[in-house]
Image: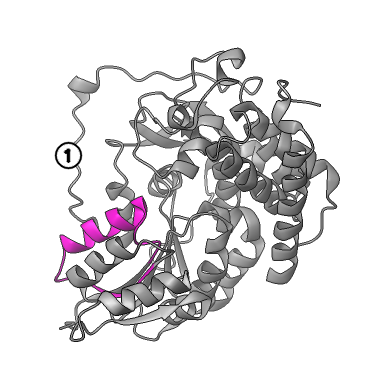
Amino acid sequence: MVSARQRMVSVLGSTGSIGVNTLDVIARHPDRFAVYGLAAHSSVATLLAQCLAFSPRYAVMMDEAAADALRSQLPADSGTEVLQGESGLSRIVTAAEVDTVMAAIVGAAGLPSALAAARAGKTVLLANKESLVMGGHLLMQAVRTSGARLLPIDSEHNAIFQCMPVNPTTAEPSLAGVGKVLLTASGGPFRQWSLARMETATPDQACAHPNWSMGRKISVDSASLMNKGLELIEACWIFDLAPAQVEVVVHPQSIIHSMVQYLDGSVLAQMGNPDMRTPIAYGLGWPERLESGVAPLDLIATARLDFEPPDEGRFPCLRLAREAVDAGGTAMAICNAANEVAVAAFLDERIRFTAIPLIIERTLEKMPILEPTSLAIVEEADTEARRIAAEQLESGLRGERRIGKV
């Protein structure tokens, strides 16, 4: 039974790492939160277990066969109704009962539901960076128009949010006195690898992140530093920053999650163990702080903190993302779509790791940049970029050994 004090939460992407960690934090505070809706693509067994544990009003499966399977396996008295597809997502993010939406669907597929939640005036906990990369103009406009509240869940942007002046009512960040932000990157598993060695990297090696436990797509993005490029774009939208105000700093220990440099010379940093439950708990409880289950940071055991500049010669995806945000318009959606196609091909062992930036760069070169004035324009750019990127896969690019400018 939902109490008057509980906030109703819908979790999109509930079977992924962010979704699982979100439900872990929610379970620690049953007096404060209740689950209204859960959504996943096709992981029937995991979503079934989550439904039995949290008794959501609705469970949404994007895959139709998976929805049928979940429907048949849920006990008749579970109280959970199974929905399917985008219409189901829309219902669990726009319902009047819902206060908070955790937007954690991976990739471009997460944009429509995140946008719907913002337009409905919800508190949106944004863990899907691609929503801002693709449709940042649309999403931020929706937040401002509806009075929604957007709280970043990516560890780096959550850290910046914690270190930046924020309106206590709207959660809108202020740039008062801010010089720039320092976006930290672990450097990924290939930080010390040569280009020649990266040419032979396997998907399992790319996914073996030294500090974080993440899904395979985001792990490959971390290995290529495209994840940091997408986060640079995301930071520009969330905090209304120019690209020149965002500096990427490699910090292998992943203890400082990001920093804000002020005009008076001060630098504020948010530190903590690398565990996504910290930013999730901060978003769920904001403006209060909640117990998250994360162990306190032991500074003596940490012993040292190292910093170095990123090597864009070995990791050109970071340069490509910066060029996309400089170009503006649909360039960021094109960059994201091409990256998703290339990463999927690499995970399927159809291309080398070092071909990922080549596919992105060639796709950007072949497409016009338009003003993203509607969701339809953004989605059309995404679709066309995927088509062109797929053509690159079939054009013999998989055999090329060069990287960077072509």
Q: Note whether 275 is above or below 399 in the view shown.
A: below
Viewer-closest of 374 and 140: 374
Q: Is residue 349 left or right of residue 71?
A: right
Viewer-closest of 345 and 258: 345
x%, y% of residue 85? Answer: 50, 75
Viewer-closest of 328 and 361: 361
x%, y% of residue 395? Answer: 79, 37
Residue receiving disc 1 = 295
Q: Looking at numbered disc 1 in the image, what kind of residue is underneath it?
A: Ala
- Residue 303 visible in the snapshot: yes
Q: Quadrant of residue 254?
A: top left
Is disc 1 surrounded by few (<14), some (14 to 19) or many (20+) residues within 10 Å? few
What residue is drawn where x is 24% and y is 66%? 50
Residue span colored magenta: 12-39
x%, y% of residue 18? Answer: 35, 53
Is 22 within the magenta? Answer: yes
